[in-house]
Amino acid sequence: MRTVLPAALLVLALASAALPAGAPPGAAAAPPAPASPASPAFSTGSISRIRSIAGDAFSFECDDRRIVTVRLAPADCRAAGAGAVESATAVATGLLQTGPVWVFPCGQAKGASGDEVWADVWTAKGWLSDILIRAGYAKRRAEADAAALTPLEKPCASSTGLPLPPAPAFAAASCASTEGDVLQVVHKGRMLTLYLTDVTCQGLDSAKRDAATATATRLLQAGPFWVFPCPAMKGAGPDCLRARVWTQRGWLSDALLQEGSAKRAEEGDPRGTPAAASPAAAATPGPAAAPQPPAAADHAKPGSNQVKWREIQVSATNVQPMSCQSSHFRIEVPQWRLSWNLTPWRVGSPTSLSVCRVVETVASGGTSMHVGSFRGLSGSTIIRAQPGTFWVQITGSGKLDIKVEVPE
C-alpha cells in the first residue's frame, strides 16, 4: 500500500484553513477575498481620472492630483502608420472608459520628471497592447525603446479597495512547485501548469535553471501573486496555460531576466506565441489533446552535441481497467525524460500521469511524494528532480504505455 502526498493535499489544507473558528463540521466557508496586485500596480478606479486617450497612451490623475501619461510599453501605434492612431484611440477609448482597468508599471522614462509612466494595461478583454497589435493598430515596440527606464518614484494610485483585475486573471496564494519558467499552481481545486509566456530557461545550463527555480520560489513565497493567462498553447491540455505572473516585487519574468537565469522567449517559441499543434495531437479524439512542453532544447541540441538517450525498463503493477502503476525504477541523474502514448479505457475519456518519488527516509518504503502531473493521450517531458527511486501512476488507462529514458 503506497501513501502518496500529492498536490491535492495542499488543496485540502487550504480549504481547511479557510473555515472560520467555531464553524460546524461540513459547513461551507466562503473563501477569503483575494488580495489586490502588489504596488506599484494600480487600478484606474473612476473613469473620470482618465483625462485623454491617444491610442497607445492616456493621461491619468493620481491620488495626489499629479497628472501622468501612461504609455504602453509593449505597443507603438505610430509604427503601424498614420491612420493607426485614430483607430487605436477608438478601441482604447471603448475599453478604458467602460470600467476600471489595471496598470502595471515597468518604470518611468529615463530623465523624465515623473510624469510619464511606461506600463502594461490589463482590461476586461486582456492586455490592451495585445488587442491593438492583433487588430493591426500598433506594432510591438522594440525592447530597446522601453529599456531606458528608471524605477517609479512613488505609486500613482492605491491598489486596494477597488475592483480586482477581471477574469481570466486570478490570484494565487501558493505555488505547488516551480522550475523557474514552469509553475504548478492550485486554482479552484485544479492543479494548473503555467508556462511563463515571455521568458524561457530552456537551453540554459543547469546552474542558471537552478537559480531561476530558487528565485521563482522565493518571490512566490513572499505573498499572494497574480496570474494573467495569455492565448492558450495549441495542443495543450485544459490545465496548461501560458501566463505572466505579477509578484510582490513585480513581474516574475523581469526578475529572472535581470539576474540572467532566463532569456527572452523567441518568436515562435511556445512561450512567446501559441504553439502549433502536432499532427498526432490534432488527430487525437476527445478533449485531452497532448501538451507539448518546450523541452526540446534539453534533449535535442543541434550538431554533434545531440544528447543520446538510454531507455530504462519498467513494468506494470496494480493493473485495473481504468488505471495502473509502473514498477519502481531508479534514476541516478538530476534530469530524465518521460514519454507516453496512452490508450483511454473508453473513447474520449481523459487521461493523466503522475510521477512520484519514494521517500527513502521512511523505513517501510511505502511513502511517496508527488513530483509532477501531466495530461493528454501522448506527450514527452523532461523531469528535473534529485536522483532517487520513482514510479508512475496512470489514470484513465489500464495500459502502461510509457517510456523512461536517461541521458547516456
Image (cartoon, rainbow, N blue to C red):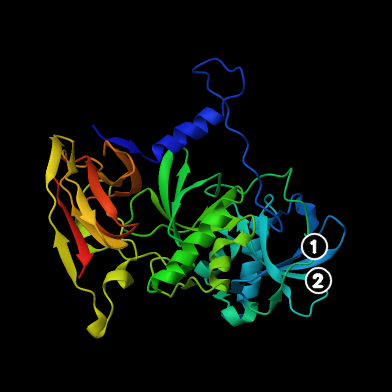
User: Considering only vertical position in the picture, is 192 above or below 61?
Assistant: above
Image coordinates for residue 273, horizontal then vertical, percent: 42, 67
Kind of residue sitting beneath label 2: Gly
**Residue position marked by numbered label 2 in the rendering:** 114
Q: Is residue 277 left or right of residue 209?
A: left
- Please indicate, yes or no, whether residue 282 appears anywhere in the rendered image: no
Which residue lies most toward the bottom here?
303
Which residue is pictured at 38% across the width and 59% down the height?
A: 233
In the picture provided, is 251 more to the left or to the right than 298? right
Local crowd size for mark 2, using a 10 Å CA cut-off: few (<14), some (14–19), many (≥20): some
Judging from the image, what secondary structure is the residue with disc 1 in?
Answer: loop
Which residue sits at x=52%, y=48%? Answer: 168
In contact (CB < 8 Å): disc 2 and disc 1: yes
Does label 2 or label 1 sit earlier along the sequence? 2
Residue sticking out furthest to the right: 65
Q: Position of residue 158 (x, y in %)?
A: 77, 51
Residue hosting label 1:
154
Q: Residues within 10 Å of mark 1 (few under 14, many from 20)?
A: few
